[in-house]
Amino acid sequence: MGEEVVLHGYFGPVRKAGKFLYFSFFHDYSSDPPRPLKVVSVIDSLSPQITKAAHQTLGSLHRFTPVALRAIVYKCAPPKSPEKRKSDEEVELRVKEIIPLNSVSENLIYTAKTIFPPEKRHLQLRTTKELCIALRLRSRTASECRKFLEENDFLEVETPLLFKSTPEGAREFLVPTRKGDGTCYALPQSPQQYKQILMASGVPRYYQLAKCFRDEDLRADRQPEFTQLDLEMSFATSDDVMDLVEGLVIRIWKNVLDVCVGPGFKRVPYWWAMKNYGTDKPDFRYPNHRIKNLHEVLPYLAKGDRFVEGFAFYGNTPNYNMDHAIEFLEKFKRENLSTRDDNYVAYIAGAGNETQAYIEGGMELWRDADLANIHGALWVHRPGAIVVIKERRGYYSGGNTKLGLLRSALLNKAIEQKFISSRSDYAFVWVIDFPLFSPTSADDPGQSGRAPFSSTHHPFTAPIAEDIQLLGSSPHRVRAEHYDLVVNGTELGGGSRRIHEAALQKYILEKVLKMPREKLQQFDHLLEVLDSGCPPHAGIALGFDRLIAVMMGRDSIRDVIAFPKNSKGADVMVGSPSVVPDKELQAYGLRRS
Amino acid sequence: MGEEVVLHGYFGPVRKAGKFLYFSFFHDYSSDPPRPLKVVSVIDSLSPQITKAAHQTLGSLHRFTPVALRAIVYKCAPPKSPEKRKSDEEVELRVKEIIPLNSVSENLIYTAKTIFPPEKRHLQLRTTKELCIALRLRSRTASECRKFLEENDFLEVETPLLFKSTPEGAREFLVPTRKGDGTCYALPQSPQQYKQILMASGVPRYYQLAKCFRDEDLRADRQPEFTQLDLEMSFATSDDVMDLVEGLVIRIWKNVLDVCVGPGFKRVPYWWAMKNYGTDKPDFRYPNHRIKNLHEVLPYLAKGDRFVEGFAFYGNTPNYNMDHAIEFLEKFKRENLSTRDDNYVAYIAGAGNETQAYIEGGMELWRDADLANIHGALWVHRPGAIVVIKERRGYYSGGNTKLGLLRSALLNKAIEQKFISSRSDYAFVWVIDFPLFSPTSADDPGQSGRAPFSSTHHPFTAPIAEDIQLLGSSPHRVRAEHYDLVVNGTELGGGSRRIHEAALQKYILEKVLKMPREKLQQFDHLLEVLDSGCPPHAGIALGFDRLIAVMMGRDSIRDVIAFPKNSKGADVMVGSPSVVPDKELQAYGLRRS
């Protein structure tokens, strides 16, 4: 108090309470969370010349001008209304001297309401409090992760980013060399192969915050480059990894968010999650609207590989009534249900066995007498319950059933409309026992094998021991020793015990996936490494961007990345990627085809 | 003691002292530094069946087989001769049960003397103690760096690796996209531009252990991808950065190496280092053989931009005599001095004004009377001193003068031959005031400007304020606010205050470097960012691989990287880079030209 300080930063807008009294806020970005300081500039006839000059400078300063500020610190009373407490108003600065340190473009117009476009990411970062907080939380979380892993004897090892093209699963980015013979590096999808090599190199426990790359058609919330917390443990089982990661997550939530979670995250098999939630990313905060198999009440619909499933839910908040439910369901139908889609029935249960707002998507109708049975099976005890029933064929595969997607969409909408009260807690769950293989889809290169399926995650995942005998006869029934960590319906990451025996790895690549010889050769180094005394090992990769987004309560990982790419893979601020002239491509022995 | 333990790891070679008594070592790699445990397997008629089986297994176990070992811990006397103390021999393990966990290829032959080729990097890592230690030291040093920077309020921010091509200085790797129109990302040479954008984004202090890429013809000890400790501070001066980094280095040396260095690293200008050591990476441990300007004693040789310089040294160890010196110089001449090279004279001073073993590389001879003056100037007071004199033209530029290279080579050879006693301490020095521009060389793309010079480091380096007036008239005389940290003749990294004003940045790119318009446009984003109120800022990048190599006392950074590339840029273990079939190139709209 009364002390003179020199600060560096920027002024907020200046409010002029007359010619001789200005108010403003000073941002120096050094506090966490960022907190502007109140500034007063006042002059009278006794003020020294330098203060008068500073006052004048403040009055005409362009926003965002970086300045050196000399000021005196005073105590001041906090404002009475709490909503006006924008800053640490115990303190205010009286301006003595201001030295502008750069000029600012006249084109940069700015008001309190300005929302800057992605082209001006630097101004988004400077003016969006949530982004500032996200970057700080990200840095702190990385620090907590490293601390925890180092305490647990993990060695941080950097693995190469200039790797080679291998059919691991995702599409890769290529990096041509200047040899001019078509040789390229490939950017790694993950450090998977190198970390397995480290296990065979006598590194007991490895970790890395690793940069990974996938040249995918960018879905809603994917980035062509992303960060994962990657770790691997030799002589370890899946349980060892899950226990360790559970400890890590509990520590992060405690130390960074000050929230207690766990211990003892639930572990559920893939089939159980698919059966009850219609997704391998179940949101355990809302367990009341689970999917039920209706084959006992509608036996004549469920034949062969045809299954009939349904779920029911009603609002649990006071504002929920039948009229709302009808309007809601009609709207939901228009937005989410397509009659071109395969069969379903959706309705709102009325009193007794009546139904209201019936929507029928082409599914074979059932007998009236079934209604009571359906309501019994789905625990529908009062009018207003929304019931959705849907047909499904074949084995569970992939991330969701169509009914599961419907259920999630309906639940989200109901929470948005406040029919169901939203929950702000964290429900962690491990989903285990995934199928080792999944049907190959058109947009997924897989392992380029001639088999009609690819590895669900990657071809190095170990099968569950008791299912190894099924590899030859019924590969679709083989379960993987793979585990996904899911929180509130979002996958944080996944891992597995890996195949550590060369013979089994070769068998799966060659005989089960039926990889052509030239692709198989790309894994020769790995087979040799396994064959030289590689210990059993298991590991995991957590999506670090996703982790931070979940901690920040954000839907998009773009909100927690300093310089994200947009949905076209472009950084519109710097203008990447850009057209490279033919002449420069020539240096790499390449030209446009 | 007497306790039963279960360990996972590998056995070393088994020494059979009869049928019933085997000795070996057990490696579990979990101790730091790695330390094998002594193992005894002994059976007699009373041993349980399982112990007998384990004994048999141990006797026939292939090296490198990963095993689970159940054993009893006993105390044992340490061996009398210290050189036999291979391990922590206070303890020995008595084998109870061994479960092999993988098979090992019969082709893997191994004796204590086996040196594995780079193709078997995993076995190098497993069996080379120095590599194990290097990886652990690397992990620990990274941890110390982060801890120090976090304590100093630095925020860790990850910047994109899919950047765009800009003429920053070095040659870049391109990453083609699948748009098929020649658009490419480029891998960053450093996060330079993004970190400057962060400074304009209100991040006060940024750091990152960043991956960087340079598509260079690989010199002796460069890697196409490498790691740098990258940091930047807003509202900071060069001194702030140097002071901070000095604190960091002192902390690392203390906490990781347990060695006290500094404080108060010397700071010398570039011209001083070049004048006295003939290099911008002076090794201050050997200050006795500095280069002297001889223009006062040989005025008729030094005319115009022609300078004559020389140095002298003699061994400081007892084994140094004249015969050695002659043999040494003759050998050195054959290996290092080429008469096709430009002018020099080298000889060994005899008694008085005589010389021995005269080597004359074509330089104009001087008058006999000059010898005394030369010896006076170079402080040659006794026979046996090796004297080298060389001509030089023009301004200092680049990293070394030819005489500087000669001096280093001679010094290294003399240390190797033990004429000069080697030093194991660390002499840190900051080299400052580099020239802002250097003549463009053929193998360096520079900034593609039409000026006959390029930025010495990168085009964002700020000129020293008082030299700005020379930018138009005498750009070669403009000094940069750049600083290099050098230890024992090795550059650990460099940094600078950056240009933070758009107008000056544009002037240097456009008017001084004379960049063509299309190249200039590639920096538009940066100019806009500077123009939006970017604060003054300065930073540095330390070569992290080099730092670890220096700490480990290794010459090559390959010895401190888990999976380095060889001199052809290849990882011979995994076989990267590899030929990518034309079909896959097509997906990127490319074909071989």
Image: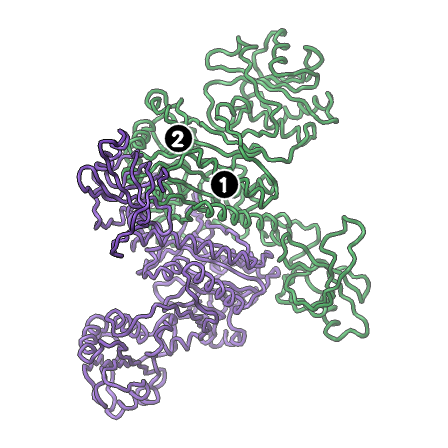
Chain colours: A purple, B green
Q: Chain of mark 1?
A: B
Q: Answer whether residue B182 is visible to the viewer in this image.
A: no
SS state under label 2:
strand
Q: Say what secondary structure mark 1 lies in.
A: strand
Residue at x-position 29% and y-position 50%: A77
Q: Position of residue A127 (x, y in %)?
A: 28, 48
Residue drawn at 37 percent across, 26 percent down: B465
Count of marks, rendered view: 2
Residue behind mark 1 = B543
Could you give the CA–CA distance between mark 2 and mark 1, rounded to whole angstroms? 20 Å
Q: Is residue B377 above or below residue A165?
A: above
x and y, in percent, of residue A524 in the image: 53, 58
User: Seen from this angle, which residue lies furthest bottom?
Assistant: A369
Pick whichever, A331 or A101, lies toward us. A101
Front residue (pair A301, B561): B561
Give the image quarter of residue B482: top left
A37 is higher (above) or lower (below) than A379: above
Question: In this view of the protein, which residue sits in the foreground, B303 or A543?
Answer: A543
Are dots 2 and 1 in contact, CB under 8 Å?
Answer: no
Q: Quickly name the residue at label 2.
A: B455
- Viewer-proximal residue, B512 or B229? B229
Report in which chain the residue with disc 2 lies: B
What amino acid type should be assigned to the residue bearing mark 1? Gly
Q: Earlier in the sequence, mark 2 or mark 1?
A: 2
Q: Position of residue A146 (x, y in %)?
A: 49, 55
Q: Amino acid at mark 2?
A: Ser
Residue A145 versus residue A239 in the image, above or below: above
